[in-house]
Image (spheres, rainbow, N blue to C red):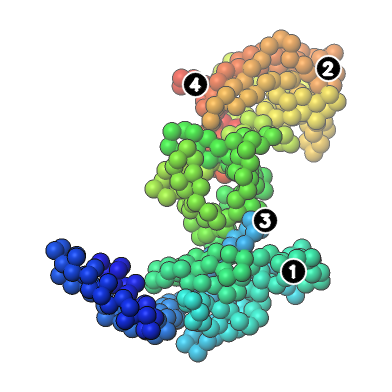
Amino acid sequence: MNKICRNLRHVRPSNRKHLVSWSSIICLSLSVTLTSCQFEDEDYFDTPAALRIEQTTADIQKTLVEAPNGWVMQYFTGTDEVEGFNILARFDQNGKVTMAGNHRFLRDGNANKYLEFASLYQMLREDGPVLAFNTWNDVLTPLVDPVDPSAAPANLVKDGEGMKGDHNFVVLSYSPEEIMLRGERHNARVRMIPCTGAWEEYLKTVNDLKNYYANTTIPNFYVIGPKADTLYFKNLRKGVITYCERIDDPLFPTVINCLFTPTGFRLHHENNIKGTKFQEFHMAADSTCLLSENDSVRVVALWDNYIVNVRNATWNFDLEQLTAEQKALADQIGEEFTKYSKNYSLASIGLGRSTGKNAVKGLVFTYYTNAGKTKTNTAGLALNTTRSAFGKMQIDYDETCKVDGNMEALAKKTDVETLARQLATSLAGVYDIIPNNYFLPTGCTIQAAGSGNKYVLK
């Protein structure tokens, strides 16, 4: 009934007289169940539309101004080709806004440096309330400027859209806890939340945490759902993620951008894995992974893959953690190196890739080649190390495993190869891996499945 009355209220005055009888009939026919034709919030809607918009824009400005430490603008442009940006903003009642940021598109030598800049803003009354940043701001405007971001400000792009940023935003919703904005031209999306600390410290915290879990060494991540369903994020550090069903030769890749926060990161759009939704991730209390809302989805660095498939380094065994039999073999191997040359001595035994001719991946023996122990070389025996499951490594060895050129040379005068093969035989098996850091391990413990032998790698 309220809907019918609302429609009648907005009929042009010149036409109302033709509808009086029909409106009376309609209201009478519904009088059995309704006793009046009035809005429950009639006082509000009796206010002219212009006054309502004016009051709303005044309320929004009041909300903007009253945030004691300003706002964090989580800013996504209208393209998924660039990351999201953290822009800090403080508003005053007189139309001044001070913004701060440290993003890579800041100009005049300020890229990736902390910068503050003051400009003007205005609350416009259009079809709805619009927050407009209507003068140049060194922090915001580079995202809006119609130039090629890789060459800014030298070259205009053909379509004049730049990064498809916006400076005029329709206010979708607002409260003291969150303001949601949509760009008028390119549909850029901004979520504003109150900033709770010093601005420069806020951005430093964001950057420090990003460098911790999204390092350059391990760029890829498992995305694990509640039923152990697994997809992948590739290149999270860049802020423009490839979301796919496998790492090598990605299957069904989707591009999704994100921005980094003091506790983790937030995706531009909500996504899902087998129906479980996620958008914002925070560091787990035990620092083993990042967790989504309600802790339902885990983002885990491929630390196990990094340990198992290390390419350019060696994970050395703590020789004191070997079994008595293995220690005896290691001691004999050391003696054989010295037998080959009085200047040779064993430095370490590890898993990795040898450096000699016909290099192999597997068991690597690093040895000093001078009496002063300042120069080293390696000899290798191939082992097959594979990731058998999440956090598990399988070591396989058989007599057909090859050796590199240095091991061949040593074998002509010593029993190093024979002893190395005996040690390799004792290492074969499946191991649980426990890293000392779940985002960039510098060491780990491997323990044979079923509480068998335990070794420390470093």
Residue 408 is labelled as 2
Q: Is residue 267 above or below residue 18?
A: above
Q: Residues within 10 Å of mark 3 (few under 14, many from 20)?
A: some
C-beta proximity under 8 Å, tags 4 and 3: no
Residue at the extreme top of the image, as rendered: 399
Q: Judge depth for marks 3 and 1 and give the one in front.
A: 1
Question: Label 3, on which residue?
Answer: 81
Which residue carries the number 1 mark?
A: 160
The answer to whether the residues at label 3 and label 1 have Cβ atoms under 8 Å apart is no
- Look at the numbered discs 4 and 2 and tell me whether their residues touch, using CB distance below 8 Å: no
First of labels 3, 2 by sequence position: 3
Q: Nearer the viewer, residue 78 or 241?
A: 78
Density class for disc 1 (Cα within 10 Å; few <14, some 14-19, many ≥20) is: few
The quarter of the image holding the N terminus is bottom left
- Image quadrant containing the C terminus: top right
Residue at figure coordinates x 66%, y 77% from the top left: 138
Q: Secondary structure at mark 3?
A: loop
Q: Amino acid at mark 1?
A: Gly
